[in-house]
C-alpha cells in the first residue's frame, strides 16, 4: 500500500488495531503491506490506535508484545519515512520503563475486536502452561472455531450447548453474544480456568444477572453457565444431565493421547443423553498428525462419524489468529 488515501489509511488503522490488541503474532503481521512514507499525523494516529488507545492504557496487553511491536515499527518507519514522530520513540521508552514491573505479573489482557460495537476483553496467563493447566490463555483453535460458528450461526442459535475444555471461555463468550444460543455451559476441568471465566463474564456482560447457582447467569433471555467438569466424571455432574446438550463444542483439546479415553468418554456420555441426537464441532490444531489420527481412531471405534469442515479463510475472518500451524474443524455425529 503506497498511496496514503484517508480511507485506505483508516482501513489499515482498524486492521492493525485489531491485530495489536489481541497480540496477533508479530511474524503474522504483514509489515510489507504497511503504508510507506507515513505523514507525521499518520504516525501519531497509528500510535493512538495501538499503544495509546484507551482500552490498552486501562487494561494493558502483554508488555513484551508491546515492546517488540514498537521496536519493529520504529525499524520500519526509519526505513520508509523521512522523520519518525516523537510519540513513537516516547511510547517505546515508556514501555521499556514498565518491563521490570511487568516481569512480576503472571497475567495480561487481550482484547478481541469483532466490530465497532463488539469486543471481548479477557485476562489471560502470559505463559502457555500455568497453574498446572494450558487453559489460562486462548489458543488458535478456539479462535478458528469462533470464526467458523460466526459464519454458521444456525448451528448454535437457540440451542442447548456444552463446551468441553473451554479454557478462557473465549469461544463460548463470542457465540453467546453473537449467535444467541438458548443455554450455553462452558466448562473446564480446572477450577482456576472456571474462576477466570466467571471474572470474564462480569467484565464482558456487565448487565448479566447472577443466578443463585455459582457460575450461572441470565442475559437477554439466554443462560450462560461456567462449570468445573472433569471429563472422567461428567456422568456425575447433575447440571450436564439437566442441560442435555444438543450441541457439543471443543477446541484445542486433542494434544495429549493420555487424555483420549476421558475425552471420548465425555463425548460418548453427552451423546447418549439425547440418544445420539447430538452434533459436535471440534477444532484441533494439527501439531502432530499422528496424535490427531489416534483420537480419530478412538472415535471410530465408538461408532462416531467425523467430517472435516472448511476453516474460514483469512480474508473472511472476523478474528486474527496464527495460521502457521494448520487447524482442522471437525463435525462429529453418531
Image (cartoon, helix red, strand yellow):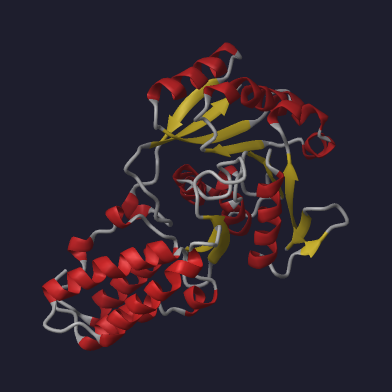
Relative vertical location of residue 212 with respect to residue 17 in this rendering, above or below: above
Displayed quadrant of residue 30? bottom left
- Residue 280 is situated, as x and y percent measured from the top left of the image, at 59, 33
Q: Residue at x 23, y 72 (%)?
A: 74
Judging depth in this view, the residue of 202 and 66 nearest the camera is 66
Left or right placement of residue 298 versus residue 45 in this view: right
Left or right placement of residue 116 versus residue 181 in this view: left
Q: Residue at x 76, y 35 (%)?
A: 244
Q: Residue at x 77, y 57 (%)?
A: 217
- Residue 186 is situated, as x and y percent measured from the top left of the image, at 67, 46
- The N terminus lies in which quarter of the figure? bottom left
Furthest residue toward front: 100
How many numbered marks appear? Answer: 0
Relative vertical location of residue 285 with respect to residue 15 in this rendering, above or below: above
Relative vertical location of residue 262 with respect to residue 35 in this rendering, above or below: above
Left or right placement of residue 279 versus residue 241 in this view: left
Q: Residue at x 53, y 50 (%)?
A: 137
Relative vertical location of residue 226 with respect to residue 243 in this rendering, above or below: below
Amino acid at each position: 500500500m503506497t498511496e496514503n488515501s484517508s480511507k485506505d489509511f483508516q482501513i489499515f488503522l482498524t486492521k492493525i488495531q485489531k491485530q495489536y490488541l489481541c497480540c496477533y503474532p508479530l511474524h503474522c503481521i504483514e509489515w510489507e503491506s504497511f503504508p510507506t512514507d507515513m505523514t507525521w499525523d499518520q504516525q501519531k494516529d497509528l500510535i493512538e490506535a495501538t499503544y495509546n488507545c484507551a482500552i490498552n492504557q486501562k487494561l494493558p496487553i502483554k508488555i513484551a508484545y508491546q515492546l517488540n511491536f514498537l521496536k519493529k515499527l520504529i525499524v520500519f518507519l526509519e526505513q520508509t519515512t523521512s522523520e519518525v514522530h516523537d510519540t513513537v520513540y516516547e511510547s517505546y521508552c515508556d514501555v521499556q520503563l514498565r518491563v521490570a514491573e511487568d516481569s512480576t505479573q503472571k497475567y495480561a489482557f487481550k482484547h478481541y475486536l469483532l466490530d465497532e460495537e463488539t469486543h471481548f476483553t479477557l485476562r489471560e496467563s502470559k505463559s502457555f502452561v500455568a497453574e498446572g493447566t494450558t487453559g489460562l490463555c486462548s489458543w488458535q483453535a478456539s479462535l478458528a472455531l469462533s470464526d467458523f460458528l460466526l459464519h454458521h450461526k444456525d448451528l448454535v442459535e437457540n440451542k442447548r450447548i456444552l463446551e468441553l475444555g473451554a479454557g478462557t471461555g473465549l469461544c463460548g463468550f463470542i457465540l453467546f453474544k453473537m449467535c444467541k444460543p438458548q443455554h450455553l455451559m462452558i466448562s473446564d476441568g480446572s477450577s482456576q480456568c472456571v474462576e477466570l471465566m466467571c471474572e470474564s463474564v462480569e467484565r464482558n456482560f456487565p448487565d448479566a444477572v447472577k443466578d443463585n447457582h455459582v457460575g450461572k447467569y441470565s442475559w437477554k433471555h439466554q443462560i450462560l453457565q461456567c462449570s468445573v467438569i472433569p471429563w472422567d466424571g461428567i456422568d456425575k455432574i447433575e447440571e450436564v444431565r439437566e442441560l442435555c446438550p444438543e450441541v457439543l463444542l471443543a477446541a484445542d483439546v486433542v494434544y495429549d493421547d493420555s487424555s483420549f479415553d476421558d475425552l471420548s468418554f465425555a463425548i460418548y456420555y453427552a451423546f447418549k443423553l439425547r440418544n445420539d441426537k447430538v452434533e459436535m464441532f471440534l477444532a484441533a490444531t494439527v501439531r502432530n498428525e499422528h496424535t490427531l489420527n489416534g483420537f480419530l481412531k478412538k472415535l471410530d471405534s465408538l461408532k462416531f462419524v467425523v467430517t472435516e469442515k472448511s476453516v474460514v479463510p483469512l480474508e473472511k475472518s472476523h478474528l486474527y489468529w496464527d495460521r502457521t500451524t494448520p487447524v482442522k474443524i471437525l463435525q462429529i455425529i453418531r
